[in-house]
Structure formats: C-alpha cells, structure tokens
Image: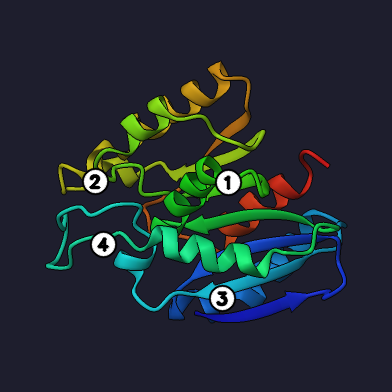
Amino acid sequence: MNIFEYGKKKSEIVLIQPVDEHEIDMIEAVMSRIRKRTDRDFLLAAFKVNDWNKDLSPWRAPAVFGKDDFGDGAQDTLEEIMMYCEDNSKTYMIGGYSLAGLFSLWAGYKTGLFKAVAAVSPSMWFPGFDEFMKENKIMCNNVYLSLGNKEEKAKNPVMATVGDRILSAENLLKERGVNCVLEWNEGNHFRDADLRIAKGFSWILEQGL
C-alpha cells in the first residue's frame, strides 16, 4: 500500500484512514473540515489499498452487488498499518468510510493499538459481522458510528439490513461500557462522504486523551 501523510508530521495524534483512489482526492477537503471542528494537532496517514473488496474484508464472503466477492485480506492490511504505528509516544486512532469503516471497527477488536475508532457509513451488513461483535470484545473505549438516513432503504436486501445492524452495534457497545455515539446523516450512502468522515474524525479526536 502507498501511504500519504497530511497535517503535522510531529503531531502526537495520528489518524489512520484506509482509502481508495477517489478518497485520496477528497482528503484536503476532509482536513479543512476537521480543522474547522477541532483545534487539536494531528497527522492523517491515508493508506491507499490496492483491492478494496479483498484488502478490507475480514473474511471471505460472496458478492452482494456486482460480481466481485469479498476476500480475506484485512489481517494483512492491519499488519501493514501496525508496522507504521510503531512510535509508542504517539496516540493512534483509525477511521474509514464504507467497507473501510467496517475494517476500522474490526481492527478495534483485533488490537489495542487504536485509542478510538470512527466507523463512518460502515458496511455493517457484511455477512457474519454482527455475530463477530457479539462473540468478541473490542479493545478501545471510544467508537463513533454514523449512517445516512436513506442507506437502509437500499433495494439490495442484504445492504438494507444496515440500519438494524448499526443500531444493534451501538447498543452492544454501550452495554459493554464503550463510549459510543451513533450519528445519523442526511442522504444515501454516497452523499457528503468528506463531511461525514470529517465529523467522525473530529469526534474521536476529542475522546480518550
């Protein structure tokens, strides 16, 4: 993966974001929006994944749209990110949009490295992820969840479960003592992605420090 860094290199807080080609183009806008919401210094490290459906999926699953199945490359991706996060003097947080949001939440269960997670419009419909959350314990204390208020109205029956799944996730995390918030945004999955990411990162920047 290629790594693109934005912000102050020497900042004590490092935000990790898995991204695709399209999201790289909007990071400057995300940075601007975050700075309007918080005065904390931070470095944003964007990890550009090569194969979205493979590199961010925790386990194999059949395609729910199009023809591309989901792979099981999340562990390899996480290990590469963890190699980047070797400075123990820094505070690391992770967040992402869509499948990268699901990956970020999953990463919070796999390592205690991250102090906070922002799962923005995450793919909570991913097969088996609700059971994974019930059977495992998250290792961070701060989780931001968000969803567009029209996302659960998707015509795809699997993706239409996203509303119920994210509500269940919020309840489960709160029951287990996690500082968790769920924010509803206007629109479908593709609306205002830069604003939604900025809102998620701004929230976690203010938590757990």
Above or below — where is 154 with respect to 48?
above
Question: Who comes first in sequence, dot 3 or dot 1?
Answer: 3
What is the number of the mark on residue 26? 3
First along the sequence among labels 3 and 4: 3
Percent position of residue 122, x then y: 42, 49
SS of the residue at dot 1? loop
Q: What residue does disc 1 label? A: 111
Three-letter residue code for mark 4: Gly
Q: Is residue 45 visible?
A: yes
Mark 4, residue position: 71
Please, is residue 176 above or below residue 183 in the view?
A: above
Q: Residue at x 26, y 62 (%)?
A: 71
Most extreme residue toward the top, as rendered? 175
Marked residue nearer the N-terminal end (4 or 2): 4
Indicate the secondary structure of the residue bearing disc 2. helix
Q: Nearer the viewer, mark 4 or mark 1?
A: 1
Location of mark 2 (residue): 159
Q: What residue do we see at 24% from left, 46% from top?
A: 159
| Element assignment for label 3 | loop
Q: Where is residue 43? Give x, y as percent.
A: 76, 68
